[in-house]
Image (cartoon, rainbow, N blue to C red):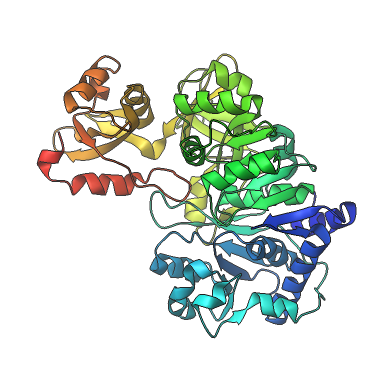
Amino acid sequence: MAMTFLQALRLNARRFPTRPAVIFEGRAESYPAFLDRVERMMTVLARRGIGPGDKVAVISENHPDFLAAYVAVTGLGAIPAPINYRISPTVMAEVVARADSKALLLGEVAAEHVGLFRGVVADIIALGEGAAGAPGLARLSELLAATPPDPPHGQDGTTIMLHTSGTTGTPKGLLRSLFGMEHRAIEQRFRPDDRALAALPICLSAGCTYTLLPLYLGASIYLLRRFDAALALRLIETERLTATMLLPAMLQRMVETDGFASADLSSLRTLQSGGGEMYPDLKRTMLDKVGDALMVYAASSEAGPYANLTAAELRRNLTGNCVGRPFFGVDLKILDDDGKEVPRGEVGEICTRSESRYDDYYKDPEMTAQTRRGDYLTVGDLGRIDAEGLLWFTGRKRDIIKSGGINVHAPEIEEALASHPAIAEAHCIGLPDPRWTEAICAVIVPAPGARLTVAEVMAHAEARLERYKRPRRVVFMPAVPRNLTGRVLKTELREAVLALPEEETR
């Protein structure tokens, strides 16, 4: 990274002395005012003993104090450790402890559990309105008001301890000092004159990066405490917002919101999406609505962004999970299990080398080593590159069902089933089976108002899938478990299906 977050903020405060840095719930804060908030926070934390290498956990919904904490903590050479506020309180406390946190900035959303955190961290400060739910805590707003800015100099860094989304277990801490902000701006068309909607939870990797990115460039951020589809539509229209990053699940909620059809979203120049597959109907709807602003990218917390799909290429590839060309600055290869590059068109493991990647899993060298392929990095994503140089995501190594000794990629079955007009979502899992090792089970979320039978699903599968790829069981559910980013929690889904009475599973 060419600059630290603190360096960028200080430069932007001089470049744009009257420009709003953050607009939150109707209140705008200029770049100089936001810098003052950050430097006061640095002073407060330094006087409480926070310095280079120390970990500062943050549990909160989106708030200007949370955003300022990223800049202030890294400005001290310390390491912010944001934690997903949607996981259980006991797991939150475990993650705080595992991160070796020296302090905790605690928002209102988890303040009632302060007793759990007192047992694992010495210093707890109420962030935002957090003191309302936990009397007796020092309140950050009062500390900032009483502390003139006098921060230490010369020790700022860029390292953040992010946590994986926890789709396969307890979130893992990963240290990351490289974010490739300039590469993202070039590839995804973010600019210093943007008015950017920041609606993703900034406790998560994508939310952290795509909220810091506009601030790094000198743009104005419209920060939402939590995602509200109607509010997002209204802000884009009335404030003429130009850029945002939204997950497919967020876009779907916007499409289903009253007023979407009439909303004027023509100001958007960049609508970046990712973090899960976007179904063809949603692609068409969003392309019709925002045109060339729409782009879809592929990334992971560890590898950073590794592919990006423009609207023009998206129109030609509406079906399937095409994620575009390798990202600007990313050296991407498709390797087999022996580390050899596979021929074009064949499926293998997506491996990347770039200036936007994680350093290592915190205190877990064995797991870190599992992601290395020499100089390249992988998290087990599988894909293929077609004749045009476009990358197609085909699943994850852990999303393989071993049926009768044959590896079956769940996304391939899901795509075939989801082409039925009465199926809103299709998710495939492997269930224990004494004969087949794993039996393919399709979990179907019917489209609103649709009437669907097991026989219809099976017939649809027979027409589109080889025999060994067809589901042996079908379960209907009104919804499936998801994490904060909208990704399906397949471990929980499998447990839910196994808990069903046998007669409910066909």
For the point 11% across and 42% down, the residue is 502
Residue 137 position by quadrant? bottom right
Q: Position of residue 40 (x, y in %)?
A: 76, 73
Q: Which residue is more in the foreground, 219 or 183?
A: 219
- Locate residue 499 relative to residue 228 in the image: left or right: left
For the point 67% across and 30% down, the residue is 266
Q: Position of residue 87 (x, y in %)?
A: 42, 60
Q: Which residue of the protein is positioned furthest toward the left in this rendering?
A: 503
For the point 68% across and 34% down, the residue is 268
Q: Which residue is more in the foreground, 104 or 343?
A: 104
Q: Which residue of the protein is positioned furthest toward the bottom in this rendering?
A: 136
Q: Position of residue 253 (x, y in %)?
A: 47, 40
Quadrant of the snapshot with the C terminus: top left
Q: Position of residue 285 (x, y in %)?
A: 51, 26
Question: Could you tell me how many numbered marks the image carries?
Answer: 0
Placement of 47 over or under 455, stated as above or below: below
Placement of 161 over or under 292, stated as above or below: below
Placement of 27 over or under 435, stated as above or below: below
- Locate residue 503 relative to residue 437 in the image: left or right: left
Q: Which residue is more in the foreground, 258 or 3?
A: 258
Placement of 44 over or under 492, stated as above or below: below
**In this rendering, does residue 180 appear at all?**
no
**In this rendering, does residue 140 appear at all?**
yes
